[in-house]
Structures are given as structure tokens and as C-alpha cells.
């Protein structure tokens, strides 16, 4: 029995970061969304932060009205963001942790400690018809909390694994990989849809695509960097190819680590 296809979500936040660094209108993240879809993306991810450091309210509105895509809105579980999501009605909403002083989203959401806060947000978004996911580490206690909250999906934070590989910390990388493998299987066993993202490049995306439980990867910063040299469309095509190669490589999913 073959594994289900794996979807590619492109995060366009850092196209907006480049635009905002100088001001003005360019580069346009909406154009980046269109190019990504044309190149083989399955959906577009955009994080509307409370400090609006990259994606803006206008960007979100344009993504909803001007781009033919399934939009995944990353958001903090606040009353402001919940109201915006309920107004915009994106296809999906991913709840993430957020701190003003961080450079980017660091670590996973502590769903266990924040169950009471998250419960009404998850309920409101699900009832509005959105596919809600929680961005968490591959820890069973966090996955159990996500299941209790009745979020349809989780997104496993892959940053620890990717950082350990980049730093040459082989033992840490293997431990992180084993946690991802276990977490993905455990979550799928609870009936959750499993996504993954953060820090992925061509090699790590190919490797994690060997896990049949994972049905979606969300990738942004690496591809925006690659776009400087290759163009965004070509970078997305190469990522799509890497993921498809990983999917075809089953059952390599039982092996630890990834060749860099």
C-alpha cells in the first residue's frame, strides 16, 4: 500500500520581510504566492504577527481575495488574531507561539500548559470551518493535549532536528529524528493529521517525506533564500522534486538521520 501524497505549503513571510526592510511595495508577497502555486505548491502559509513585522493585514486580505490558493494563516491564540481569522476565513489556521523579542517562531506551542486558553480559540476556528493545527514539538504529552483540544491536525516543529544536523551534532540529530518518527506515528494513531515544518531544506525535506504519517510540509525561509540565486519558481520546483523523491523512497523512514 503506497503512502498518501505529501503536500507542500510555501510560507511567504520573508518575502514581506524583504519588502518591509526598505518600505514600499516590493517585493510583493502576493506575487510570490502566485508564483509558488504555479510552481507546484499546494497551499500558501502566512503568519500575521501581533507586531506585523512581515505579513500585514492588507497582505492577508489580498491573499484571501486575489490568490487562488488554500491559505494557511499562522497566528497566535489571541482574541485579536481570532477575530481577524474569523473575518478572513482562511482555509486553515495554525496556532503558534509568539514572543516580541524573537527573530522567528522559536520552539513549539506549549499546548499542555495552555489548554484552557487554547480550547475556545480552537473551537471557534473549527466551528468556522477552518482546518486548525497546533505547532508543537514531537512530544507525546503535547500531542495528547492537541488531541484533547480536538484540533484536526498538528504541525511538528522540526527546528531542533535541522539545527542539530547543521551544527554536526549527530547524536542530538538522531534523538530529534527518533522523536519526530515516534511523534508522527503516535499522532496519526490518535487520528490527527500530521504536518511538519521549520528549518527544512532540500535534504531534510526529502528525508522527512519518507514518513508516511506526515502529509504536509510548510517551508519558507530556506526557499526565499534559494530564490535569490535560482528564482522562486525554480526553488519551489526543486523542493517539490525532493519531497516526491523522499516519498518514493519508502521504507527508508525506518532509518535515522539524513545524509547532507
Image (spheres, rainbow, N blue to C red):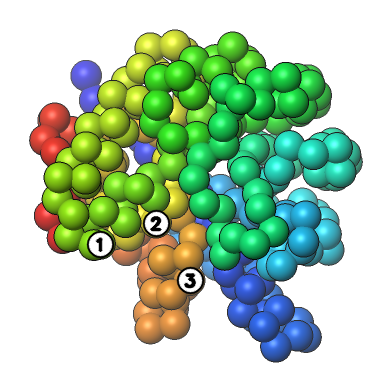
- Disc number placed over residue 166 in the picture, else none: 1
Q: Residues within 10 Å of mark 1 (few under 14, many from 20)?
A: few
Locate the N terminus and report the quarter of the image it occupies: top left
Q: Nearer the viewer, mark 1 or mark 2?
A: 1
In percent of width and height, residue 198 lies at 44, 51
Query: In percent of the image, x 74 and y 26: which residue is there?
Result: 117
Q: Nearer the viewer, residue 117 or 195?
A: 117
Q: Quadrant of residue 184?
A: top left
For residue 47, say whether it is visible: yes
- Kind of element beneath mark 2: loop
Relative horizontal placement of residue 240, taking residue 68 as reference (left or right): left
Q: On the image, numbered disc 2 is attached to which residue?
A: 199
Q: Nearer the viewer, mark 1 or mark 3?
A: 1
What's the distance in space between the residues labelled 1 and 3, CA to CA?
18 Å
Query: In percent of the image, x 65 and y 49: which residue is there?
Result: 98
Locate the C terminus and report the quarter of the image it occupies: bottom left
In percent of width and height, residue 134 lies at 57, 32
Kindly indicate whether the residue at mark 2 contacts the one at mark 1 (C-beta within 8 angstroms): yes
Q: Nearer the viewer, mark 2 or mark 3?
A: 2
For residue 38, say whether it is visible: no
Q: On the image, numbered disc 3 is attached to which residue?
A: 224
- Numbered disc total: 3
Amino acid at each position: 500500500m503506497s503512502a498518501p501524497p505529501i503536500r507542500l505549503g510555501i510560507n511567504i513571510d520573508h518575502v514581506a520581510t524583504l519588502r518591509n526592510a526598505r518600505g514600499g511595495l516590493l517585493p510583493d508577497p502576493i506575487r510570490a504566492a502566485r508564483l509558488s502555486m504555479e510552481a507546484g505548491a499546494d497551499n500558501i502559509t502566512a503568519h500575521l504577527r501581533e507586531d506585523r513585522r512581515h505579513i500585514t493585514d492588507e497582505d492577508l486580505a489580498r491573499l484571501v481575495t486575489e490568490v487562488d490558493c488554500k491559505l494557511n494563516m499562522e497566528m497566535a491564540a489571541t482574541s485579536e488574531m481570532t477575530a481577524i481569522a474569523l473575518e478572513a476565513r482562511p482555509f486553515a489556521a495554525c496556532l503558534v507561539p509568539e514572543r516580541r523579542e524573537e527573530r522567528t517562531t522559536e520552539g513549539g506551542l506549549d499546548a499542555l500548559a495552555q489548554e484552557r486558553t487554547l480550547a475556545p480559540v480552537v473551537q471557534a476556528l473549527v466551528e468556522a470551518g477552518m482546518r486548525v493545527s497546533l505547532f508543537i514539538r514531537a512530544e507525546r504529552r503535547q500531542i495528547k493535549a492537541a488531541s484533547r483540544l480536538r484540533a484536526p491536525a498538528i504541525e511538528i516543529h522540526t527546528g531542533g532536528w535541522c539545527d542539530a544536523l547543521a551544527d554536526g551534532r549527530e547524536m542530538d540529530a538522531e534523538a530529534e529524528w527518533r522523536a519526530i518518527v515516534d511523534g508522527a506515528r503516535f499522532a496519526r494513531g490518535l487520528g490527527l493529521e500530521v504536518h511538519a515544518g521549520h528549518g527544512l531544506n532540500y535534504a531534510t525535506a526529502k528525508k522527512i517525506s519518507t514518513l508516511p504519517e506526515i502529509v504536509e510540509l510548510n517551508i519558507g525561509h530556506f526557499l526565499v533564500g534559494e530564490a535569490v540565486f535560482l528564482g522562486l519558481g525554480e526553488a519551489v520546483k526543486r523542493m517539490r522534486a525532493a519531497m516526491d523523491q523522499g516519498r518514493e523512497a519508502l521504507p527508508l523512514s525506518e532509518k535515522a538521520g539524513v545524509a547532507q
